[in-house]
Image (cartoon, rainbow, N blue to C red):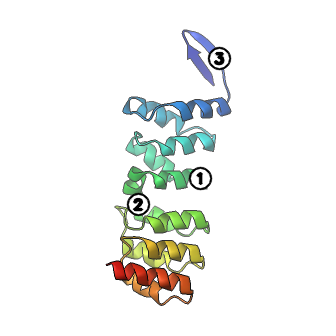
C-alpha cells in the first residue's frame, strides 16, 4: 500500500493502515474512505470501520457478511447495522456458538428492525448458555411471550430475571 503526503509516496503495511484508520474522525466526509477500508484483508481494519457511524449502507451490508466474529460483533453494536441486518442473516448468526455474540443479539433483540423479535427470541431461548438466556430475560423490550417462557426456566437465576422483567411491564 502507498500513502501519499505532499506528493511523497510511502510504502506502508496493513498494521500501519489499521493505526491510521483508528485515528480517522467519524465524519460523513470520510464515508468513501471507510468503504475502501472495509474491503481490506486485515480484519482489525474492518472492525475499526464497523465502529464508525458515518458508513454507508453498502459498507454496512458488506460488514454484516464478514466472516470474522469481532467485525460482526462491532457492526451489530452499530445502530445502523442493527437496522439493516436481515432476519435471515441474524438467525444465521444466532446459530454461531459464541456466547458474547449471542448475548449481544439477546441484549438488542428488539432493535433489529428487519427481524421479528419474537422469532429471534424464540431462537435464542433454546441456547444452552445461561448467560444468553439472562441477557434475553433482562431486555427492556423482550417480548412478553419469551419472558413467560424464561420465567419457567430450570435455572433459578434466569427465572428470577424474567419474572422481574415481567413485573416491570
Which structural element holds mark 2?
A: loop
Q: Quadrant of the C terminus?
A: bottom left
Q: Which residue is mark 3?
A: 10
Q: In the figure, residue 4 lies in which quadrant?
A: top right
Residue 18 lies left or right of residue 64; in this view the side is right
Within 10 angstroms of label 2, few (less than 14), some, or many (20 or more) residues?
some
Q: x and y percent of residue 147 in the render?
A: 41, 82
Mark 1 and mark 3 lie on one chain; the one further toward the N terminus is 3
* Cα–Cα span, label 3 and label 2: 41 Å
Q: x and y percent of residue 41 in the render?
A: 62, 40
Q: x and y percent of residue 90 in the render?
A: 46, 64
Q: Which residue is mark 2?
A: 86
Tell whether label 3 touches label 1 (CB within 8 Å).
no
Which structural element holds mark 3?
A: strand
Which structural element holds mark 1?
A: helix
Task: Say which of 46 and 40 sits in front.
Answer: 46
Mark 1 and mark 2 lie on one chain; the one further toward the N terminus is 1
Residue at position x 47%, y 80% from top?
Answer: 161
Q: How many marks?
A: 3
Q: Quadrant of the N terminus?
A: top right
Residue at position x 40%, y 52% from top?
Answer: 79
Q: Is residue 36 above or below residue 131?
A: above
Amino acid at each position: 500500500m502507498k500513502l501519499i503526503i505532499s506528493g511523497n509516496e510511502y510504502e506502508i503495511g496493513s498494521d500501519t493502515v489499521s493505526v491510521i484508520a483508528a485515528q480517522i474522525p467519524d465524519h460523513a466526509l470520510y464515508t468513501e474512505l471507510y468503504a475502501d477500508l472495509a474491503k481490506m484483508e486485515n480484519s482489525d481494519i474492518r472492525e475499526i470501520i464497523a465502529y464508525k457511524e458515518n458508513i454507508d449502507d453498502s459498507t454496512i451490508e458488506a460488514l454484516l457478511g464478514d466472516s470474522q466474529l469481532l467485525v460482526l460483533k462491532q457492526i451489530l453494536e452499530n445502530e445502523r447495522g442493527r437496522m439493516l441486518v436481515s432476519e435471515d442473516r441474524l438467525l444465521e448468526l444466532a446459530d454461531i456458538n459464541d456466547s458474547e455474540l449471542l448475548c449481544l443479539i439477546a441484549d438488542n433483540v428488539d432493535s433489529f428492525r428487519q427481524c421479528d423479535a419474537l422469532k429471534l427470541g424464540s431462537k435464542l431461548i433454546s441456547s444452552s448458555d445461561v448467560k444468553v438466556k439472562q441477557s434475553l430475560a433482562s431486555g427492556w423490550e423482550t417480548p412478553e411471550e419469551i419472558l413467560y417462557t424464561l420465567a419457567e426456566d430450570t435455572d433459578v437465576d434466569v427465572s428470577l430475571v424474567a419474572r422481574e422483567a415481567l413485573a416491570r411491564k
